[in-house]
Amino acid sequence: MSNQLKPAVDGHDHSQGPRSAPLELVEYGDYQCSYCGEAYPEVKAARQALGDKLRFVFRNFPLTEAHPHAQQAALAAEAAARQGKFWEMHDALYEHQDQLDSAGLQQHAQQLELDMDQFQSDLKSSAVTEKVEADFESGVRSGVNGTPAFFVNGELYQGNWQDGELTRFLQSQLQ
């Protein structure tokens, strides 16, 4: 299996931070995965510590056999993206992992003041489904077999991401 990110980050990806940043961190995540929930504040800490030196990209990798709400949560994030609120929904899903059923997703959408008719329509749209599937397939091609999976500048990161290790590793890459 490859340890290279395939495809490279492009305009279809959700990213935070400058495109010109010397470091690019890509996470393949599942909104219902408890490990991804634990990684969420670690990624936020890394982003805060590195500032403009880091570009963070999130790709959906719902492990539907283990997590029955993961697919719908990923679709909700992508539906929110169509109204310019991907990152707000991403954060809400990770901060409320116990509220990923249909009622919880509706509540998050309402709290983000999304157009609910559009949100419902987008949840069922082929464009949103295809985006989640494309993210998942890119993870498979990149050798992802669990979540969270991180790539740093296109290479699979196999180190520990807990207890500030991810931030320390990223900082070491700048030296």
Image: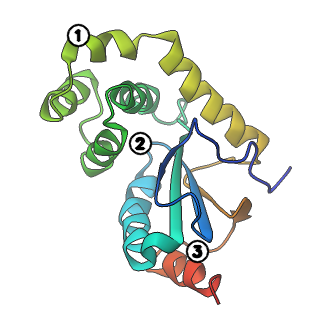
Q: Is 100 on the left-hand or right-hand side of 165?
A: left
Please state which of residues 108 and 148 is positioned toward the viewer in this rendering: 108
x and y, in percent, of residue 21 in the image:
57, 67
Asked which colour scheme the image uses, the reply is rainbow
- What residue type is disc 3 on? Asn
Foreground tag (3 vs 1): 1
Q: Earlier in the sequence, mark 2 or mark 3?
A: 2
User: For the residue carrying disc 2, how many other residues have a C-alpha within 10 Å: few (<14), some (14-19), or many (20+)?
Assistant: many
Residue 105 lies left or right of residue 123; in this view the side is left
Q: Note whether 68 is above or below 127 in the view shown.
A: below
Name which of mark 1 and mark 2 comes first in the sequence. Answer: 2
How far is disc 2 from disc 3 in space, using C-alphas?
A: 20 Å
Q: Residue furthest bottom?
A: 175
Residue that label 1 marks: 117
Per the rendering, the mark at residue 31 is: 2
Please give left or right for residue 166 compared with residue 81 in the image: right
Q: CA distance from mark 1 to mark 2?
A: 23 Å
**Quarter of the figure with residue 42:** bottom left
Residue at image position (51%, 36%) is 66
